[in-house]
Image (cartoon, rainbow, N blue to C red):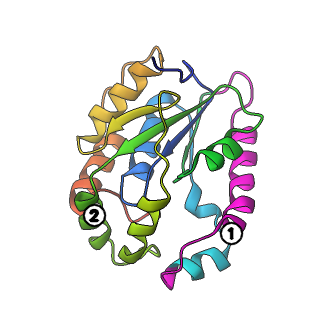
Amino acid sequence: MNTYPLRPRRIIVMGVSGCGKSTVGAALADALGGTFADGDDFHPEKNIRKMRTGTPLDDGDREPWLDRLNAWLHDASPPGAAPAVLACSALKAAYRERLARGLHPCAFLFLRVDPATLAARIQARPDHFMPPALLRSQLDTLEPPGAEALSLDADQPVDQIIAEAVRAFGFNVTPETPDSVRTAKAQTEETGGETNRPS
């Protein structure tokens, strides 16, 4: 039985690098009339330098970053506002708990992709600071969520993912594949899964 909240004020689109969370998150926020942020934009420079060299982040690197994301979710979703949508890897259960601390209702959308597809997508993004060598580390770190998250196959058109998410979360809107969704879909197809934004 699914236990994720309906009509959440905050939605975190999660998964390993290359799953499409930046593309899907932006399109979902657009469909709901909400606000979007990419978690990678909140990384301090030292984290980015570490990842560029192929060194995985540790919990000490991630904790201040997760706290900044939690603060953004709080500020971006006041009562009565449209949902705030965040793209964030959120690989471990402890990270998800830290992200959602004090935020209710907060929902997670987990994008599932097989490792071979992920590797191909990351190879197609040469300008991204996340090198292909770190994919194995992310997959090893990943603790897939259970019924507390909405889990969707990310190897399908973006507009279909958005329609499924909107319906599953119980929002009373009918996405009509707005321009941003069409653009996101086109960029996903061109780059093998995501735009040039970090994920």
Using the numbered discs, state the Cα–Cα distance from disc 2 to disc 1 in whole angstroms: 25 Å
Give the quarter of the image for residue 81: top right
Q: Nearer the viewer, residue 121 or 95?
A: 95
Q: Which residues are magenta?
A: 52-81
Please rate how many residues cluster around mark 1, counting C-alpha atoms within 10 Å: few if below 14, some from 14 to 19, many from 20. some
Look at the image and tell me in which quarter the N terminus lies: top left
Label for residue 61? 1
| Residue at image location 57% in from the left, 21% down from the top | 5
The amino acid type, in three-letter code, at marker 1 is: Asp
x and y percentages locating residue 88 in the rendered image: 54, 52
SS for dot 2: helix
Q: Residue furthest bottom?
A: 53
For mark 1, give the secondary structure.
helix
Q: Is residue 178 visible?
A: no
Position of 132 with respect to 99 (left or right) is: left
Q: Which mark is residue 121?
A: 2
> What is the x, y in percent for residue 162?
36, 32
- The residue positioned 46% from the left and 36% from the top of the image is 109
